[in-house]
């Protein structure tokens, strides 16, 4: 969910390089929740229709209190608030005075991929720094691709060499039920993906870390996308995959808001993470900053690759798939029409 920083201690650089953050599928745990169940050995999660009596025996998965979650995101992210209020545009469209928190500016350079980094020493009564990153990317806004950089292990390894395991253990396929719980489409957008994911880092100077999260993706009518997630509490440990347990890292807040601009899209990325194990924040903060910079460097290369790039090939494959689907539809229609003509001919002969 892993520079411009020069660490004062050489050991810090090697130590924190081993720590991989769950850079986008992690967020704050909330008290209110809704349960989903899955049956048998099926990896898909089937949402209940309406009441407990209709749930099948299996694994229960809780959804967060969305109102609380998105309120916390909006309070720290002016771009998220801008998008959720139905507005268009990126950072240049933000209203003056929309940022009311007392941020400390860590970096500001319009020529860099991540052109602004801010920090709060604590947020929502949690004494873990909240980091905020701003970046402007040229190219088409495709939220699924940005999510793919974080959720797909092979893609993740291109920018995060400390990631050992990273997969979605329980995808929730009944998005209609999730959107019914969300309720307010104008405010929350439409949930297009949600599930429980697991991330584990490699062994290095520090021991491996692991995370269990439920995360999702919202798409809005104004063309924006928001990634969100919720760190699962200890009572949800039955969802962890089998195997040796490791020190838990916890993200108290995560969100990434992508808003379209004239020639690309702006991204505002929030992360409030405790890496666990008692490692002090003054050591982990530079490492987290370095990790997110690597993610955005990868994002920039991907979306601005041009002709023959990975993005170009991906878009062409999607177009080829759409063309094949059109051909299938035409073929199916032609087959039905031919069958109807044959039937009509038989009736006429009779």
Image: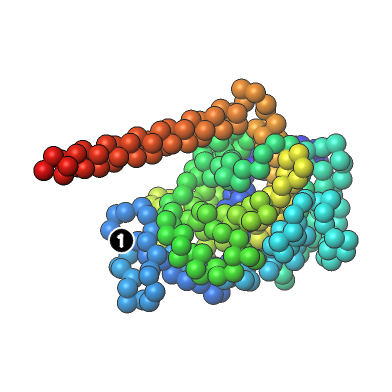
Q: Residue at x 65, y 23 (%)?
A: 307
Q: Residue at x 36, y 76 (%)?
A: 52
Q: Name the spot of residue 201 as percent of width and height, x first.
A: 55, 44
Please indicate whether residue 347 sits to the left or right of residue 237 in the image. left
Residue occupied by mark 1: 39
Quadrant, the C terminus: top left
The image quarter containing residue 228 is bottom right
Q: Position of residue 67 (x, y in %)?
A: 62, 71
For the question of whether residue 283 can be seen, the reply is: no
Q: Residue furthest top?
A: 308
Q: Is residue 193 above or below residue 237?
A: above
Q: Which of 208 and 173 is in front in this view?
A: 173
Q: Residue at x 45, y 65 (%)?
A: 177
Does 180 sit above or below residue 88? below
**Can the viewer see residue 50?**
yes
Task: Assess disc 1: are there few (<14), some (14-19) or many (≥20) residues with their C-alpha within 10 Å of its C-alpha.
Answer: some
- Picture coordinates of residue 59 (x, y %)? 36, 63
Q: Is residue 65 above or below residue 110?
A: below
Q: Residue 153 in the image: state x and y as whole percent.
A: 51, 39
Secondary structure type for disc 1: loop
Q: How are the residues colored?
A: rainbow
Q: Is residue 316 left or right of residue 98?
A: left
The residue depicted at 64 percent of the width and 56 percent of the height is: 221
């Amino acid at each position: 969910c892993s520079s411009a920083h020069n660490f004062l201690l050489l050991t810090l650089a090697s130590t924190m390089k081993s720590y991989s953050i769950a850079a986008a599928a992690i967020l704050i745990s909330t008290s209110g929740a809704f349960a989903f169940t899955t049956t048998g050995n099926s990896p898909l999660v089937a949402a209940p229709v309406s009441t407990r009596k209709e749930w099948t025996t299996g694994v229960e998965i809780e959804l967060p209190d969305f109102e609380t979650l998105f309120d916390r995101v909006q309070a720290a992210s002016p771009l998220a608030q801008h998008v959720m209020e139905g507005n268009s545009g990126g950072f240049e469209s933000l209203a003056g005075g929309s940022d009311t928190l007392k941020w400390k500016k860590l970096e500001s350079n319009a020529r860099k991929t991540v052109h602004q980094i801010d920090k709060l020493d604590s947020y929502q009564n949690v004494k873990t720094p909240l980091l905020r990153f701003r970046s402007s990317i040229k190219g088409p806004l495709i939220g699924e691709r940005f999510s793919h950089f974080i959720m797909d292990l092979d893609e993740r390894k291109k920018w995060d060499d400390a990631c050992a395991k990273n997969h979605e253990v329980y995808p929730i396929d009944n998005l209609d039920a999730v959107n019914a719980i969300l309720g307010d489409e104008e405010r929350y957008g439409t949930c297009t993906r949600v599930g429980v994911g697991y991330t584990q880092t490699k062994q290095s100077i520090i021991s491996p870390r692991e995370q269990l999260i439920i995360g999702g993706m919202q798409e809005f009518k104004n063309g924006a996308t928001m990634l969100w997630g919720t760190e699962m509490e200890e009572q949800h440990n039955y969802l962890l995959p089998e195997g040796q347990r490791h020190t838990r890292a916890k993200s108290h807040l995560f969100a990434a808001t992508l808003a379209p601009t004239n020639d690309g899209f702006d991204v505002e990325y929030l992360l409030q993470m405790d890496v666990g194990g008692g490692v002090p924040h003054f050591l982990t903060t530079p490492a987290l900053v370095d990790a997110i910079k690597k993610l955005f460097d990868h994002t920039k290369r991907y979306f601005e690759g041009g002709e023959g790039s990975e993005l170009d090939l991906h878009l062409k494959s999607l177009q080829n798939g759409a063309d094949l689907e059109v051909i299938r539809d035409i073929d199916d229609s032609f087959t039905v029409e031919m069958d109807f003509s044959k039937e009509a001919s038989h009736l006429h002969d009779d």
